[in-house]
Image: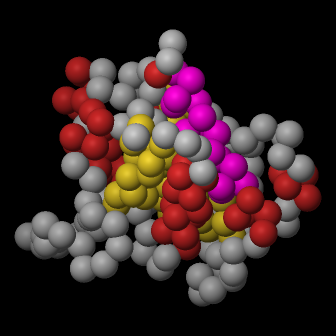
Amino acid sequence: MTPILVLYYSRHGSTRQLAQLIAQGIHSVAGCEARVRTVPAISTVTEATESAIPDSGAPYVELNDFKECAGLALGSPTRFGNMASAMKYFWDGTAADWVSGTLSGKPACVFTSTGSLHGGQESTLLSMMLPLLHHGMLILGLPYSHPELMATKSGGSPYGATHWSGLDGKLPMTEDSRTLSIALGKRLAETALKLQTK
């Protein structure tokens, strides 16, 4: 099976939901499996540390996951139009993989969740693309052949999958967001397989 890494950070569950839908799209491609991982939270208290294993949800990513994956889906909630600090902190520690080219030439996509509809979904997606481009990854988006992109009132972008969760994080995932997330995971897996056969 070809492993595709789905790496996300989520505080209240909305970004985790997107990660699970993207993983579903990956699993729909014969020969591919989703490897779902997260990153630990960071603290303003410098002595604070996270346990080696999360209390719940996906395990923490290990740099070996980069070596083994054939593609990467990266997700974070929006923080003032940018990726969350925990995700940025993680990427700031990947210089060794950058130097060695571990991710170079592999396909990648991005996804995010926001509390407000115009809360920076697309700028957050773009912010997550930056380290991926520096790592030499090939960025995938969603083409307009998906009619949901023209009809959605809840999120979704040619830059990646999105979800508007509401200020309390309780707005349900719409069918458009679900469809686009699954499609993005499927596209990533199909592209990874094509690149491996070249």
User: Which residue corresponds to the image point at 51% horizontal and 31% vertical from the top-left?
Assistant: 192
User: Which residue is pictured at 24% across the width and 73% down the height?
Assistant: 54
Asked whether, in this view, residue 80 is left or right of residue 136, the answer is: right
Asked whether the viewer can see residue 179, the reply is yes
| Residue 98 location (% of width, % of height) | 29, 26
The picture places residue 16, in percent across and down from the top left corner, at 49, 68
Task: Measuring from the top left, give residue 53's x and y in whole percent.
Answer: 18, 70
The residue sitting at the top extreme is 198
* Residue 155 placement: quadrant: bottom right
Query: Which stretch is magenta?
Result: 180-195
Regarding residue 121, the answer to whether it shows in the image is no
Q: Is residue 170 left or right of residue 59?
A: right
Residue name at image x 39 percent, y 22 percent:
104
Q: Residue at x 85, y 66 (%)?
A: 153
Q: In the rendered image of this protein, does residue 114 appear above or below residue 182?
A: below
Residue 146: x %, y % from top left: 83, 46
- Image quadrant containing the N terminus: top left
Please name whichever residue, 22 or 11, is drawn nearer the observer in this view of the structure: 22
Hey, which quadrant is residue 114 in on the image? Answer: bottom right
**Residue 91 in magenta stretch:** no
Count of number-bearing discs: 0
- Specify whether 187 is left or right of 84: right
Residue 189 highlighted magenta (yes or no): yes
Q: Main secondary structure of the magenta part?
A: helix
Extreme-left residue of the structure? 47
Q: How is this picture coloured?
A: secondary structure
